[in-house]
Each structure stands twice: as structure tokens, then as C-alpha cells.
Image (cartoon, helix red, strand yellow):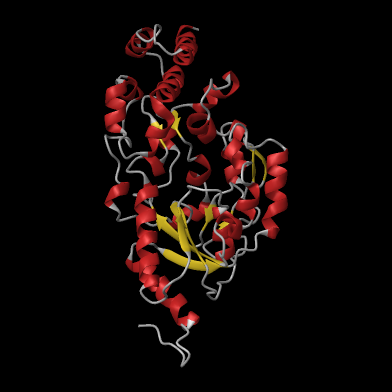
Amino acid sequence: MITTSPSSDINLDDLAQEIKRWGIELGFQQVAITDINLDNYRNHFDSWLDNGYHAEMAYMANNKEKRCDPSKLLEGTCRVICVRMDYALETTNSLAPLRNSKYAYVSRYARGRDYHKLIRKRLQRLAEKISSQVDPHGYRAFVDSAPVLERALAEKSGLGWIGKNTMLINKQAGSWFFLGELFTDLPLPIDKQETDHCGSCNACIDVCPTNAFVAPNLLDASKCISYLTIELRTSIPVEFRSAMGNRVFGCDDCQLICPWNKFTKVSTEEDFSPRHGLDNATLLDLFKWTETEFLSNTEGSAIRRIGYECWQRNLAVGLGNAERGGDILTALKAQTNNPSAMVREHVQWAIDQHQA
């Protein structure tokens, strides 16, 4: 139980320590607290938007003031409790799977169940534990679900630093982790911000297949394979298709190459375990899924949000980049009358690659 003063006010220092302990008990690997002053991040964010680097992600420009001032998203907010949860299931960080053109590469974070609900439920339970000590208090949990500058808040809280690849990097755990936030009106003591430790390393910038990094910590999303395979709902620009290789949902190159990921920690969360063989599936096997199979196999998965049409589009590109084989060409030709004009166009591109 938290000690209180004679006036029955909660001892906020003790409460902050208890919150961190509760968070670890709930399965988070780290919990830290920050204030809501994001002035140091506003100019960078504004410039990123002004340059159009958000591509067709119009939602990034919407509610900009709420992103830069958490109190405008939830009135009364003065602190943000930031959490991270590891999701890697192996400590090996190799680019080798990207060289086997027969197999589909699905970004590690999306191979298991969707993390959003799991982390949000844990944050809600954390809030309820706080409520058992402080009631009433205002709070709201967020997991990549609202206009929140989550990496900026996480960096301010000390969970890591925003690296040259725009990912949050932690000295003890690398970058294979999810983030979540609990906004609160409790004036808790804040933690010290982490400093940058990328140094002179440019491995992530150099390895990017599509040269999507304009500069360190500056990503042009319109060139990023994660954007092209997940966020983009129209035709993938021809100039990026060959560079996509076998990446059909997301891209992990800039994390796989990061030296800090030698400290990767293996997750024990069963929900993050690969489903339907998505860590070792061939492009052909996935391309043969019917829409019914897609909906069934991606139930509770982050993959479902792109829809069956974009799923086929991405796989068609992957097959176009695969080693030549009659079975691949046969599968592609079987889709030349696909009801989607977008899929047909990508299928024809893939056929052309094999017949060139």
C-alpha cells in the first residue's frame, strides 16, 4: 500500500515506483514516466509534414496539435506513463531470409496476434491498479491508436532514443519492442531522458533497399517498403518493385542490421508466436489463399487491415522477384483475370519479369 501524508495525499514518489513494479508484473519490460512538453519535437514533425514525407498518410497531418500537446487529446493530462514490450522470438538478426526469394518475408511484429489489444488491456489493468490507490483520476490508454507522438514521448521518458532509422532503440534491448502510453492527470515524478547512442554508424541508412532515408532520423515514407506494403492502398510505383524483393508485409532491414540489436531479448508472450507458418511460408502458398482463407488466417492479426486485394498485390510483386519457375508462372497466369484491376496490373508486371 502506498504511504500517505496526514492530509491523505498520495506520496507520488512511492506511487511512481509502484506503477513501475506493477507494469513489470503485467508483462511490460520497462515502464517510465515523462511530462507532456514536446516542443523540441514540433519543428522536426512540422518539417516532415511540410515536405510531404508522410505520403498518403493524411491522418499524420490531422490533429497535429493533439499530437504535439497530449493535454489537447485528453484534457487534464500532465504526465504520460510509457511502456515497452519485447516481441522478438529469436536473438539472431540476419538478412539471410531476404535472400531466399522462394519464401515470403513478413515483418516480425506481424507474424503473431495483433499487439494492440494485448497491450491496451495490460495498460487498462495498470490504470485500474493505480485507481485502487488514487481515485478518482483521469487517464486513457493508447497503443498506436490515436494522434500520439509515441516515440517522442518514449524517448523523453528514457525508454530509449530515436535512432537514425527513426526507431526507438534501447541500450539493453535493441529495438524489437512495442510501445504503449497511459495518459494521466497525476503529477508523477518524471524520469531522465535517454541520450543518443547511434554515433557515426549509418548501417540502417546504407542497407535500406529503396533509399528511403533522406537523412539520419528523416524517412520519406513514400519510398519505404513498410509504407508501400501496408499503408499504400493503390498501385506500388514500378521503380520500387524490384527492390521489394520478397518483403510482402513490412520491412525489417534497418532493424536487422542495427548493431544494438545484438542485445535483443526473446519474448515469452505466446500471442507473439508466428501463426499459420508466417515465419516460414512460401510466396506461392500465401498467394494461393482464397479471400475466405485470408480472412480466416489473419483473424486477430495486424495483416488483416491491408485487406485481401493489397495482400495479393504484395505477393504478386514478391513472385515477380522470385527465381524463375514454371509453378510460379502458372500461378501468376491463373490470376490474369483477377477481379481487381490493381492485382491484375501487378500480376502482369510479375509475369513480365519472368518472361523477360
Q: Position of residue 157 (x, y in %)?
A: 55, 65
Residue drawn at (31%, 22%), measured in percent from left and top? 291
Q: Position of residue 299 (x, y in %)?
A: 30, 36
Name the quarter where the N terminus is drawn: bottom left
Residue drawn at (41%, 87%), measured in percent from left and top? 3
Residue drawn at (43%, 87%), measured in percent from left and top? 4
Outermost residue, bottom side: 6
User: Quadrant of the rendered structure where residue 333 is?
Assistant: top left
134 relative to 155, above or below: below
Q: Position of residue 214 (x, y in %)?
A: 68, 39
**Closer-to-camera residue (163/116):** 116
Q: Is residue 26 left or right of residue 76?
A: left
- Can residue 52 be seen here? yes
Counting every numbered tag in the picture gives 0
149 relative to 243, above or below: below
Q: Is residue 305 left or right of residue 189?
A: left
